[in-house]
Image: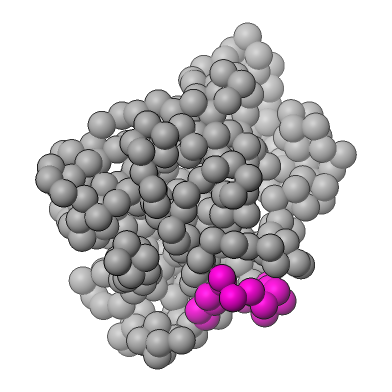
Amino acid sequence: MPEVWTDFQPPPGLRSGHVQSLISSSGIRKRVVLRRSEALRLAAEVWTLDGGDDIRLQGLYSAQAGDSKGLAVLLHGWEGSVNSNYVLANGARLYASGFDVFRLNFRDHGDTHHLNHEIFHSCRLDEVVHALRDLQDRLGAEPWYLAGYSLGGNFSMRVALQAEQAGLHIGHVVAVNPVINPLHAMVSMEEGIRFYERYFERKWSRSLKIKKQAFPELYGQETWHEIKGLRERTHYLATRHAGFQNAEEYFEGYSIADDRLAPLAVPSTILTSADDPVVPVGDFEELPANANLELIVTEHGGHCGFLKNWKLESMAEDLIADRFLMAAG
């Protein structure tokens, strides 16, 4: 494994996992990322994809004006969107490197709450796989490349597991700080600095209010956004709206822990950090050995950070571009 990745050392002041996590998603970095992603955003077209069973998922497609090195698809994390800092930053980097870029919104993320009646949950893998097959077929992309952050990294690895069966021709997957065991991530937020739980609680509340407004005939009486605590709200939504017996069964439904990655056949890279305040690094130590899975664990990086300098450039973007360019030949 190249030392350039495993020996990642950000400068003084950027070595705290909390600092990495907070600055990465901050408005300060947003200004930098918006400037860097101008070409990507100017080229973007809104595409609506077929998720199967009358489900619609939406994203933004930025095609090269000339020759392309292939298609790169980016998946955001929970309550993120196609305009999250890390999605825009990676999209800009890949677009500048010659790739066509598709940024996909999960159901009820970004401004897509009105597209589907039922609410989002993390076990809705089939619609993502179906939408990616629709995208692949419409573009004639073979092979193409997939990267995701946090929950998007979890989805990316589960998509890779379904690739052969679904006829997806994926050349390489990169997952950054992917959720491995969702229950452990929940405990990590509950037992750590409460900022992270409150951050996701606020964003989720906003999303649920928008969903309620989009479908008042279905959810007009719901007070789900008033339930305090992620675990309590997850239990309510999992049992009332997703068909699970409890939150623990729901968490198991999208876990990639234990030996779930053992049959992985798509070349994949997982990048995580020992100081991630959301996804415990111990979960990665128990992943199965697999020749198709490259695991890179750094000392620093936080959650979806890996900022390498005060220009707020990210080593994760370097890694994703490197792996995709290598796979594209």
Q: Is residue 180 above or below residue 293?
A: above
**Residue 300 in sight from this viewpoint:** yes
Residue at left 30%, top 77%? 308
Q: Is residue 307 left or right of residue 293?
A: left
Identify the image's colour scheme: rainbow, by chain, secondary structure or one colour.
one colour
Q: Is residue 28 left or right of residue 316?
A: left
The image position of residue 23, as x and y in percent, is 36, 65
The image position of residue 268, as x and y in percent, is 51, 66
Is residue 288 located in the magenta-colored stretch of the structure? yes
Magenta segment, which residues?
281-297
Q: Is residue 316 left or right of residue 30?
A: right
Quarter the C terminus occupies: bottom left
Q: Quadrant of residue 29?
A: bottom left
Residue at left 40%, top 90%? 3
Q: Quadrant of residue 211?
A: top right
Q: Is residue 255 left or right of residue 1?
A: right
Residue in front for this viewpoint, 60 or 80? 60
The image position of residue 248, as x and y in percent, is 82, 51
Q: Quadrant of residue 293?
A: bottom right
Residue at left 55%, top 34%? 130
